Image (cartoon, rainbow, N blue to C red):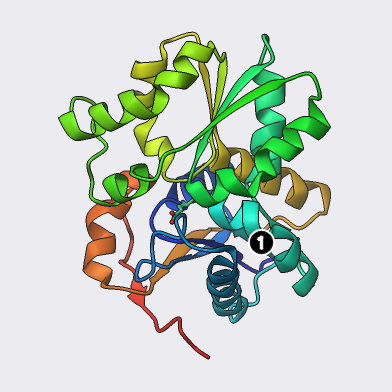
Amino acid sequence: MDQRPIGVFDSGLGGLTAVRQLRRLLPSEQIIYFGDTARVPYGNRSRETILKYARQDVAFLRRFDPKAVVIACGTVSSNCLHELQAENDIPVVGVVEPAVRQAVQETKSGRVGLIATRASVSSGAYQELFRRLAPGAEVFSRACPLFVPLVEEGRFQPGDPVIETVAGEYLADLKRAGVDTLVLGCTHYPLLTEVIGGVMGEGVALVDAGGAAAQAVSRWLAEHDALAAGGGGADYYVSDRAADFARLAEIFLQESLEHTAKQIEIEMD
Ligand code: DGL
C-alpha cells in the first residue's frame, strides 16, 4: 500500500482525459494534476523547449512527493520520456508505449493510423515502437496541429462546422489508406471521439493514448503493491487563469469538480 499521490501533467486540459480514466480505474488514489495552460500548446515547439517545460512540470509535481508521475501528454511522452525517466527516481509513465501496445492488440489488418501533434509525429517515437512491437504493421501518420487549439476553445462538438471541416481534411488520407485502428496520440483528442469516429466510420477502432496509460499505471501499482486505500480525490493546478480551467474541465473529466484549480507560477528558474 502506498498513500502518496499520483502526479499527472499535460500542456493544458487534454491530460484530464487520462485523469478521467485514472479516477474510474483507481477511485482510491489521490491525483495531483498540473495543466500548463499558460504555455499550451507544446506540440508546435522545438524538442529543447518541450524538454525545458516538461522538467519544470515534473519539478512542480515532485513537491507533492508523488509515487509516480504520468506524462498525460503525447508530445512530452514522445520527445522527452527517456530524459524524464533517467532524471527521476520514481516511475515516470508516458502514453506512447501503452497506446502502441493497445493498437497492436486491436488491429486485425495491420494497417494502423496515428494522429498526434506535429512534435509527436516528427519525433518518430510512436512509429519506432510499432516497428519494434509489430514489425509487419503499416503505420500511416498525420499531424493535426489545429485539433489542440480547437479543443481548448471548446470547439469539439459533432456538427460544429469548423471541427468537422478540419477533421475531414486531416483524416482523409488515413481513411483512404483503409486503417482499421487509429491511435489518438494526443490526450486532447478523446474529446473528438465522435467527430473522428464519424469521419473514419464504424469499423475503425480508436485508441485513447491517455486511457491506455491510465490502465498501464493501474496495472503497475497493483503489481507493485502500491495502491492507495481509502477515499481518493484530485487537486488541480494550472499556470494561467483558473476560471478558464473550470469552464472546460468538467467536460473533459465528465464529473463535477469538488473545487476548482489553483493558479501557480511555473517558470521557477
Ligand atoms: N495533450 C497534448 C498531447 O498529448 C497536447 C499537446 C500540445 O500542447 O500541443 O500531445
Q: Is mark 1 within 8 Å of ligand 1?
A: no
Q: Is residue 172 above or below residue 211?
A: above
Quarter in which the N terminus is drawn = bottom right
Residue 222: percent from the left, percent from the top? Answer: 76, 47
Question: Which quarter of the picture shows residue 130?
Answer: top right
SS at badge 1: helix
Relative to the observer, which residue lies in front, 244 or 145? 145
Residue occupying image coordinates x 23% and y 50%? 153
Asked whether the viewer can see residue 254, the reply is no
| In the displayed structure image, the side of residue 150 where residue 130 appears, left or right | right
| Amino acid under disc 1 | Cys
Q: How many marks?
A: 1
Residue occupying image coordinates x 53% and y 63%? 46
Residue 99: percent from the left, percent from the top? Answer: 64, 36
Asked whether the viewer can see residue 77, the reply is yes
Relative to the observer, which residue lies in front, 154 or 43? 43
**Residue at the disc numbered 1:** 80
Question: Which quarter of the picture shows residue 61?
Answer: bottom right
| In the displayed structure image, the side of residue 39 where residue 2 appears, left or right | right
Residue occupying image coordinates x 53% and y 14%? 177
Of all residues shown, which one is farthest toward the bottom?
269
Q: Is residue 219 above or below residue 113?
A: below
Residue 138: percent from the left, percent from the top? Answer: 68, 20
Residue occupying image coordinates x 30% and y 45%? 151
Residue 219: percent from the left, percent from the top? Answer: 74, 43
> How busy is the neighbourhood of tag 1: few (under 14 within 10 Å), some, or many (20 plus)?
many
